[in-house]
Image: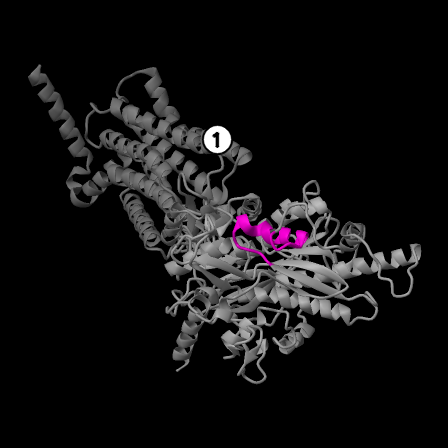
């Protein structure tokens, strides 16, 4: 039933506006008057004529014979604000005593070519106006009130400048009208929109709208607001999705513009800012309303007259729009005044009867169209639905109210001054010209407050607060403007903008807060990458690099995690790294530990075996003292590898490298001594003095301490200059901090390793020289082969060591120590253990002599 009521009401309104046949309803004059000692002339856009089929008039050129009338009942509040202010002043005994205010009201056409017609009609007081003629002997009007479009005020103001008549405008502030050279006698009542762009951008920022379309007038107003919006939008990283500059007057729209506006529907921008005054916007808004653009959020600076373009659709293009209006205090007295307004109280008003006829079922008297019959009792404008008539005073109404008070106070000051300068006889009325009011009016509007509201500061309007209204028009025809927030540029930072989101109604397409972005937001873990050739709001989302995070949406750059942290898999949070090292409990550490212990035990077994068979030829043949020394050193080498396993500390870091260098120096110098021993052993029968001296002096035994001393010097220099220390590797293993020993000086480490390789090379050379000697108990071949393996292990170690990190690098060093130690153990002592354990028959001096004698005979036979 509710929907049926609204549909019927909308049909009645449409019929009443456009298709009524009642003669009284369509008969209207362009002016009416309210008597007073002094008058204010007002030019308001209250009705217009339009043609239905463009049928030419039979007698008048450039006129149509099928004219129809359309009343702008929303603008009738201009008349009510004027009447309210005048009545309030007339009732005030302290303001203009013995002087009453009245007004002359003229309709302003909506076409530019007819704007000046009624103004000239007022100036000449002739039914057919002639320029420079004035049929009124004594002019009562002291000022003109114009609006609401800037064009109306500009055209009329140019004419009034010739007569030096004060002019006050109630429409939106316009910078053109502030030009003192062109409009020296014009004063604007509306505050300047210096903070409008910031207020609109604050709404965008609140809802994270970064891709917004702009529809602006193609004139100086559009250029100014575009500059302001662009500056504030760039500061908040908001981009212009599209920009349409339209002609200022609705009747100048072309078919090309209609086609361009259809592109708005296809734009990805869901939020559109439309700036302009009520007159210049109505043609564009009517067209948008016909297109049923229900998926856009409109931001306006002028209210939309929803009831003027009613149809049978339940949805409406501007439902859910935001309207920014200047804030002013609520006028309770005005609402009370509205309740008392009726056609009988103001018989000179030729618009009120049209209200009562249309909305309260009255009928016109047959004798007079101003008289009504059969009206509803207690009919009042306050009873009308709010989409038809809003009893709250609008911005324009408040400006009209202030303008009337400005004239009244200025006139009061002028009268007081004239009374002091020239006395008047009793009953004689004071006479003056409108231009005499100019200095008083200028002084008032530049320095005075009207009922607590500052009008101007010089000719520069001060910033004002804005009320943010949400337009409710679903079902279509509801037409309510609901205040949902406010903006004050003078408020402290962070308190300028306030909004009540639960009260907001969005366009019918959206079930939640709409988004208006060129690109979807980059979620945490991604960063924005600008798209080439496009606005900064258009971007691609790229995952953060390794160990980098972004913990918010739309991050321009990813933040690198500290060295002690690592990025989680989503790359939106840094996690604490766990401390790790090559521990005994790790599988790799456990395997290396078991290997080192096993081979140390095996080496110990070999040592015991050699001690038990110390008097056998094979043990005695290659200097058993050197064999014992080598085996003990190998045991130490195997056990020294355990220093690399477990949590490092300063002592273990130093012992790792020192033990490694010293022990392997001892092992390799022992091998070198054994190789030299082999050579000496098989040349002992030669009666040479040097060989005999080497045997007697036991020179090979001095090789070990000499070589070890050299290594001790190198290690000492290493410890003094740059000793090993505890270090952390945060990059080797994801999520872990590897604690390991740093070599300190890489040069010293490579010098130690190079020295060991030189000993190995020397040992290999000596063993190679003795390869052709008799092979009974001759271990030269085994020594040379073991040195080859040792050399290969450590030469291979260097590139592999430098190409690994973390625990693997430590394990590689342990493996090299074990591998080289095993090579020495197996290649040198395994053949001897084989003979001792499995072939004891070869471990005798008789076998040695027999083999030697056989070789000599073979050699003689061969010769």
Residue reaching furthest bottom? 377
The stretch of residues the image draws in magenta is: 107-128
Seen from the viewer's position, the closer of residues 836 and 232 is 232
Q: Quadrant of the C terminus?
A: top left
Q: Is residue 595 magenta?
A: no
Q: Secondary structure at mark 1?
A: helix
Q: Residue at x 24, y 31 (%)?
A: 785
Give above or below for 386 relative to 323: below
Which corner quadrant of the image does residue 749 belong to? top left
Q: Is residue 111 magenta?
A: yes
Q: Which residue is mark 1?
A: 714
Seen from the viewer's position, the closer of residues 601 and 215 is 215
Q: Residue at x 53, y 35 (%)?
A: 722
Q: Is residue 566 visible?
A: yes
Q: Residue at x 44, y 39 (%)?
A: 657
Q: Residue at x 43, y 29 (%)?
A: 751
Q: Is residue 563 visible?
A: no
Seen from the viewer's position, the closer of residues 372 and 196 is 372
Q: Quadrant of the N terminus?
A: bottom left
Residue reaching furthest front? 59
Describe residue 74's horizontal placement relative to residue 119 as left or right. left
Seen from the viewer's position, the closer of residues 469 and 439 is 439
Q: Position of residue 838 (x, y in %)?
A: 16, 45
Q: Position of residue 204 (x, y in %)?
A: 51, 56
Q: Position of residue 786 (x, y in %)?
A: 27, 34
Q: Position of residue 652 (x, y in %)?
A: 47, 47
Q: Are there few (<14), some (14-19), or many (20+) residues within 10 Å of tag 1?
A: some
Total number of numbered labels? 1
Describe residue 27's horizontal placement relative to residue 121 as left or right. left
């Amino acid at each position: 039933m509710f929907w049926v009521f609204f549909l019927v009401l909308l049909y009645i309104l449409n019929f009443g506006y456009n298709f009524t046949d009642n003669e009284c309803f369509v008969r209207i004059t362009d002016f009416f008057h309210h008597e007073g000692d002094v008058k204010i002339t007002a030019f308001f856009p209250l009705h217009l004529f339009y043609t239905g089929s463009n049928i030419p008039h039979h007698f008048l050129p450039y006129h149509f014979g099928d004219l129809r009338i359309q009343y702008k009942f929303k603008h009738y509040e201009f008349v009510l604000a004027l009447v309210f202010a005048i009545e309030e002043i007339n009732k005030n005994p302290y303001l203009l005593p013995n002087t009453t205010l009245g007004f002359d009201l003229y309709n302003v056409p909506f076409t530019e070519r007819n704007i000046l017609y009624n103004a000239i009609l007022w100036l000449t007081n002739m039914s057919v106006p002639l320029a420079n003629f004035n049929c009124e002997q004594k002019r009562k009007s002291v000022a003109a009130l114009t609006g609401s479009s800037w064009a109306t005020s500009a055209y009329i103001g140019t004419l009034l400048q010739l007569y030096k008549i004060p002019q006050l405008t109630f429409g939106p502030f316009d910078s053109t009208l502030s030009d003192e050279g062109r409009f020296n006698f014009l004063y604007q009542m509306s505050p300047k929109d210096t903070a409008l762009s910031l207020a609109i951008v604050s709404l965008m920022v609140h809802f994270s709208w970064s891709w917004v379309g702009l529809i602006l007038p193609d004139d100086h107003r559009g250029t100014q607001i575009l500059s302001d919006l662009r500056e504030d939008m760039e500061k908040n990283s908001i981009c212009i999705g599209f920009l349409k500059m339209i002609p200022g007057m609705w009747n100048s729209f072309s078919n090309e513009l209609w086609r361009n506006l259809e592109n708005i529907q296809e734009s990805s921008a869901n939020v559109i800012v439309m700036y302009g005054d009520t007159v210049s916007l109505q043609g564009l808004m009517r067209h948008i309303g016909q297109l049923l653009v229900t998926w856009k959020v409109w931001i306006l600076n002028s209210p939309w007259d929803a009831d003027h373009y009613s149809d049978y659709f339940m949805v409406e293009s501007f439902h859910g729009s935001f309207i920014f209006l200047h804030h002013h205090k609520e006028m309770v007295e005005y609402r009370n005044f509205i309740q008392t307004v009726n056609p009988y109280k103001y018989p000179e008003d030729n618009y009120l009867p049209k209200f009562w006829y249309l909305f309260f079922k009255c009928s016109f008297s047959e004798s007079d169209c101003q008289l009504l019959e059969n009206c509803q009792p207690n009919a009042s404008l306050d009873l009308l639905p709010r989409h038809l008539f809003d009893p709250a005073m609008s911005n324009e109404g408040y400006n009209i109210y202030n303008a009337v008070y400005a004239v009244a106070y200025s006139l009061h000051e002028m009268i007081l001054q004239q009374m002091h300068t020239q006395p008047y006889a009793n009953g004689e009325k004071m006479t003056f010209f409108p231009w005499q009011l100019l200095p008083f009016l200028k002084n008032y509007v530049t320095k005075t407050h009207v009922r607590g509201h500052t009008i101007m500061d010089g000719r520069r309007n001060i910033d004002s607060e804005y009320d943010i209204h949400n337009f409710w028009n679903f079902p279509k025809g509801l037409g309510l403007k609901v205040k949902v927030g406010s903006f004050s540029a003078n408020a402290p930072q962070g308190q300028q903008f306030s909004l009540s989101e639960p009260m907001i109604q969005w366009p019918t397409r959206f079930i939640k807060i709409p988004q208006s972005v060129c690109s979807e937001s980059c979620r945490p873990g991604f960063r924005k990458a600008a798209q080439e050739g496009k606005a900064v709001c258009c971007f691609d989302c790229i995952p953060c690099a390794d160990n980098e995070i972004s913990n918010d949406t739309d991050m321009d750059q990813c933040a690198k995690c500290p060295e002690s942290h690592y990025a989680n898999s989503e790359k939106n949070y840094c996690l604490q790294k766990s401390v790790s090292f090559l521990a005994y409990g790790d599988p790799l550490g456990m395997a290396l530990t078991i290997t080192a212990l096993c081979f140390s035990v095996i080496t110990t077994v070999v040592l015991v075996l050699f001690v038990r068979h110390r008097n056998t030829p094979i043990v005695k043949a290659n200097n058993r003292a050197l064999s014992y020394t080598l085996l003990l050193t190998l045991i130490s080498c195997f056990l020294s590898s355990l220093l690399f396993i477990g949590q490092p500390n300063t002592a273990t870091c130093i012992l790792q490298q020192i033990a490694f260098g010293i022990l392997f120096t001892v092992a390799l110098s022992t091998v070198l001594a054994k190789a030299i021993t082999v050579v000496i052993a098989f040349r002992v029968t030669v009666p040479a003095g040097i060989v005999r001296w080497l045997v007697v002096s036991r020179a090979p035994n001095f090789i070990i301490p000499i070589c070890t001393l050299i290594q001790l010097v190198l290690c000492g220099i290493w410890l003094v200059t740059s000793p090993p220390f505890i270090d952390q590797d945060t990059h080797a293993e994801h999520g872990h901090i590897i604690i390991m020993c740093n070599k300190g000086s890489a040069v010293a480490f490579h010098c130690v390793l190079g020295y060991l390789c030189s000993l190995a090379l020397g040992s290999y050379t000596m063993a190679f020289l003795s390869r052709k000697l008799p092979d009974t108990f001759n271990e030269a071949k085994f020594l040379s082969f073991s040195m080859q393996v040792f050399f290969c292990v450590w030469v291979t170690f260097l590139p592999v060591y430098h190409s690994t990190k973390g625990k693997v690098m430590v394990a590689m060093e342990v493996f090299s120590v074990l591998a080289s130690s095993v090579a020495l153990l197996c290649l040198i002592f395994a053949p001897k253990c084989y003979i001792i354990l499995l072939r004891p028959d070869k471990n005798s001096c008789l076998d040695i002599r027999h083999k030697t004698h056989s070789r000599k005979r073979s050699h003689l036979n061969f010769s």
